[in-house]
Structure formats: structure tokens, C-alpha cells
Image (cartoon, rainbow, N blue to C red):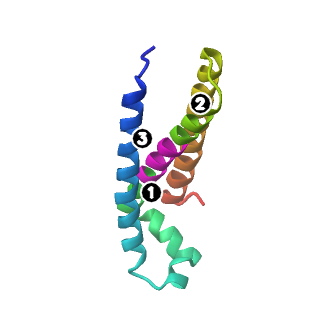
Amino acid sequence: MMILRESIIMKIHYGTAIGALFLTVIHILMRLTQDFHESLQYENVIANYENIGYAVLLELLLILISVHGFNGLRVILLEMHQGPTYEKVITFGCLAAMAGLIAYGSRTIIMTSMGMV
């Protein structure tokens, strides 16, 4: 198993923050093409998911924010307590939760974009 140094993990953390910020700006700019109340109507939301470019944007946002958020949670929890067993449990727990969130979110994006809703 490959173990990443903490400095590499923090570079990933900073990179995901910058990437998520950039994609969030694009997401907001795309939302400005309609009035706010219109963009929340069911038909418009489904149409957004059926646009493959927008679905990819949402998927990338999901991945970047999940990685960033769960790594931040991992760092906070590791600062509260140390120990090799505790660190492994926290790291693997955050990885499992992150993978579960990404899997469920991806399932939603894929099903909606394919018209299965």
C-alpha cells in the first residue's frame, strides 16, 4: 500500500480548494443565464443534468469538494488525538465516507442525466 506524506496530502488539499473554487465560479456563471426562480423549476433542473457538459462539471465539483472536505475533517480529527491506530481508523474512515458520498452522488448524476428519474 502506498502511503502519502502529509505534505503531499496538504498539496492535494490546496489543489482541490483551488479547483473547487474555479468550478464553483463556472457553476454560478452558468446559473446566471436564467432567473433564480426559473433555474429551480423541476424541468430546468433535469435539463441541466441532461446537458453532458454540465453533468461533468457537477461530477468534478462533487469529487473535488468531497476530497477537500473529508481531508479537512481528517486533519481536524487527527489534531484532536494522536496514535497510530487512531490515525489509521480516521484516515480509512474518511476515505470510506468520501468514496460512499462520491458513489452516491455519481449515481444520482448518472441516473438523472440518462433520464432514469
- Residue at label 3? 13
Which element is circle 3 on?
A: helix
Of labels 1 and 3, earlier in sequence is 3
Query: Rounded to the nearest whole Å, what is the CA distance between mark 1 and mark 3?
Result: 19 Å
Foreground tag (1 vs 3): 3
Name the residue: 45% across, 14% down: 1
Identify the residue under disc 2.
Answer: 78
Query: What secondary structure is found at the residue carrying circle 1?
Result: helix
In percent of width and height, residue 96 lies at: 60, 32
Instruction: Report the amino acid beneath label 3.
Output: His
Q: Within the image, what quadrant is residue 42 found in?
A: bottom right
The stretch in magenta equals 60-69
Estimate the x, y position of residue 77 in percent, counting from the top left: 62, 34
Dot in front, 3 or 2: 2
Q: Earlier in the sequence, mark 1 or mark 2?
A: 1
Q: Amino acid at mark 1?
A: Leu
Q: Pointer 2: residues within 10 angstroms few (<14), some, or many (20+)? A: some
Q: Residue at x 50, y 51 (%)?
A: 110
Residue lying at 42% horizontally and 41% vertically, measured from the top left? 13
Task: Report the side of 100 relative to 4 (left or right).
Answer: right
Q: Residue at x 41, y 62 (%)?
A: 24
Say which amino acid is labelled 2: Leu
Q: Where residue 95 appears, x then y in whole percent?
A: 56, 32
Task: Identify residue for label 1.
Answer: 58
N-terminal of the two: label 3 or label 2? 3
